Image (cartoon, rainbow, N blue to C red):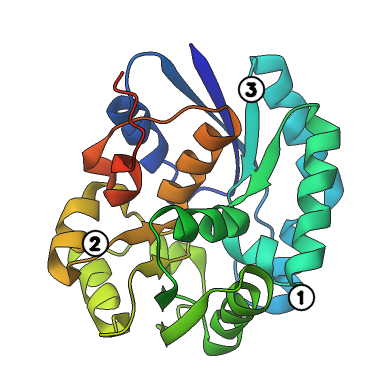
């Protein structure tokens, strides 16, 4: 049994996680601990507060006691908002607090882009434009990933995004796609995407990487596991494969 730990802010699209647990196989356990979201608004100052060390350390302790072998902080905006170096320090603090390998969904995107072999990407962001541009800066200046296009939907709150259905997610991805992009990134962890991944990839003809999906892949990477789960997208079909 491999136990994966996730720290998730508030309550939006956390039901993506039990679905992923089912698709990953019987020897993968997914544990999710929630932190308080605070004010539900996509402003830089508020996003910065979601990653405060105290609540994250408390969540790490809960996951440690549950037997998790790795922990991922699943708040993409809350982990890229201050840039690459601050995000790296945040992850280092998580690892110290948890006593296990740790990462964030922002770093998960950087690693997943490399995994699928993409050098240039499109960003399908639900965020306001200023927040979306901070994600672009994180990718380009920190991860060395070129962004061919970015589309920001301007959603003001996580609650708004959590209510989006598959059709609206589909529209977002199509609006952001670019002929030169080799993958489309959807960075919002409040967005339900897991059940739509095969359809989204079929629509654009390239890998689609979403926040909750890459967080699960990142946790597996930290535990040296690779799982062949095609229903979770192209990211989960890379060699070498371990079928559970």
Q: Say which residue label 2 marks.
A: 165
Residue 75, visible in the rendered structure: no
Quick check: 114 left or right of 70?
A: left
Residue pictured at 81% horizontal, 66% vertical: 85
Q: Is residue 176 left or right of residue 142?
A: left
Question: Which of 162/145 is in front?
Answer: 145
Residue 23, position as x, y percentages in the image: 28, 30
Q: Residues within 10 Å of mark 3 (few under 14, many from 20)?
A: many
Mark 2 Cα within 10 Å, few/some/many (few <14, many 20+)? Answer: few
* Residue for badge 3: 69
Label disc, if present, on residue 98 of the rendered structure: none
Q: Quadrant of residue 138?
A: bottom right
Q: Position of residue 119 (x, y in %)?
A: 44, 72
Q: Is the Cβ of the residue at disc 2 closer than 8 Å to that at disc 1?
A: no
Q: Label 2, label 3: how many angstroms apart (C-alpha)?
A: 33 Å
Please name whichever residue, 235 or 75, is drawn nearer the observer in this view of the structure: 235
Whether 43 is drawn above or below 19: the answer is: below
Q: Position of residue 57 (x, y in %)?
A: 81, 38
The number of callouts visible is 3
Q: CA distance from mark 2 to mark 1?
A: 28 Å
State which tag comes first along the sequence, 2 or 3: 3
Q: Which residue is located at x 51 percent, y 17 percent?
A: 2
Q: Quadrant of the C terminus?
A: top left
Report the residue marked by disc 1: 45
Return the disc, 1 or 3, that comes first in the chain's sequence: 1
């Amino acid at each position: 049994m491999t136990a994966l730990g996730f720290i998730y802010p508030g309550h939006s699209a956390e039901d993506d996680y039990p679905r992923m647990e089912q698709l990953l196989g019987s020897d993968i356990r997914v544990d999710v601990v929630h932190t308080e979201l605070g004010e539900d608004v996509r402003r830089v100052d508020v996003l910065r507060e979601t990653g405060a060390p105290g609540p994250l350390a408390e969540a790490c302790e809960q996951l440690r006691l549950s037997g998790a072998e790795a922990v991922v902080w699943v708040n993409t905006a809350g982990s890229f908002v201050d840039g690459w170096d601050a995000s790296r320090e945040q992850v280092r603090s998580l690892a110290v607090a948890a006593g296990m390998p740790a990462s964030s969904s922002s770093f998960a995107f950087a690693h997943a882009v490399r995994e699928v072999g993409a050098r240039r990407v499109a960003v399908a962001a639900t965020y306001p434009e200023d927040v979306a541009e901070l994600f672009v800066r994180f990718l380009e200046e920190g991860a060395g990933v070129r962004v061919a296009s970015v589309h920001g939907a301007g959603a003001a709150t996580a609650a708004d995004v959590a209510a989006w259905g598959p059709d609206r997610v589909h529209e977002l991805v199509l609006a952001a796609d670019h002929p030169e992009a080799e993958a489309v990134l959807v960075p919002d962890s409040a967005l339900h995407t897991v059940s739509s991944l095969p359809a989204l990839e079929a629509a654009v003809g390239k890998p689609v990487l979403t926040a909750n999906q890459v967080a699960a892949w990142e946790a597996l990477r930290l535990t040296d596991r690779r799982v062949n789960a095609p229903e979770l997208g192209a990211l989960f079909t890379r060699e070498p494969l371990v079928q559970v």
